[in-house]
Amino acid sequence: MSYIHLTACEESALKKLHKSSVNSVVRKRCFLLLYSNRNHSIQETCAVGGIHRRTLERFFTKWESKEGKEKFQFLIIAVGRGAKLKLEPLKEVLNDLVKEHNRNLNPLLHLLETQYRIKVCKSTLQAF
């Protein structure tokens, strides 16, 4: 197998999903399928996608083994994968703590580590 052959329906659905998906993994997988559909070899697709050849071969094999809507459900990351949001349960508490310690985050980091047993860096806290 050197590249994927998509039907016109699959191609249009992948293009739409590539443009509208908020998940970067889904967009990347759609792009790889569309790129391979344009008769690019696995080596070229790997170079553009920045992934290993064996990973791409496994992905293409799974894509071809699925039927109908299962193919598009396969593009989505499995439940439990991805970033775990450490600070999500403390969202309300964090707003008050940040207002208290808005100039210096070190006391806030220490409080999170001692009281809530959550260790994060300053950049994670600033991004949240």
Image (spheres, helix red, strand yellow):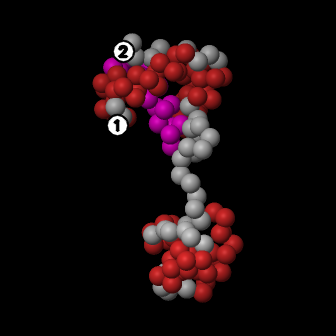
In the image, the segment drawn in magenta is: 24-41
Q: Is residue 27 left or right of residue 70?
A: left
Q: Tell me the element at label 1.
A: loop
Residue 88's spot in the image, x, y percent? 63, 63
Numbered badge on residue 22: none
Q: Which quadrant holds the C terminus?
A: bottom right
Precedes in sequence: disc 1 or disc 2: 2
Give above or below for 76 relative to 35: below
Q: Which residue is mark 2?
A: 2
Q: Is residue 29 above or below residue 4?
A: below
Relative to 38, residue 94 above or below? below
Q: Is residue 92 left or right of residue 110?
A: right
Number of numbered discs on residues? 2
Image location (x, y in percent) of residue 18: 54, 35
Q: Taking the image as drawn, is residue 9 in sight? A: yes
Say whether residue 35 is magenta.
yes
Q: Tag 2: Cα neighbours inside 10 Å, few (<14), some, or many (≥20)? A: few
Q: Is residue 113 magenta?
A: no
In this picture, is 17 found above or below 117?
Answer: above
Q: Amino acid at mark 1?
A: Gly
Residue nearest the observer in this picture, 77 or 23: 77
| Residue 6 shows up from this direction | no
Instruction: Provide the residue designation for mark 1.
Output: 50
Q: Residue at x 64, y 18 (%)?
A: 68
At x 45%, y 69%, the residue is 121
The front one of 78 and 10 is: 78
The spot of residue 65 in percent (x, y) is: 55, 15
**Residue at horizontal 66 percent and vertical 22 percent from the top:** 69
In depth, the one of 17 and 99 nearer the eye is 99
Residue 54 occupies quadrant: top left
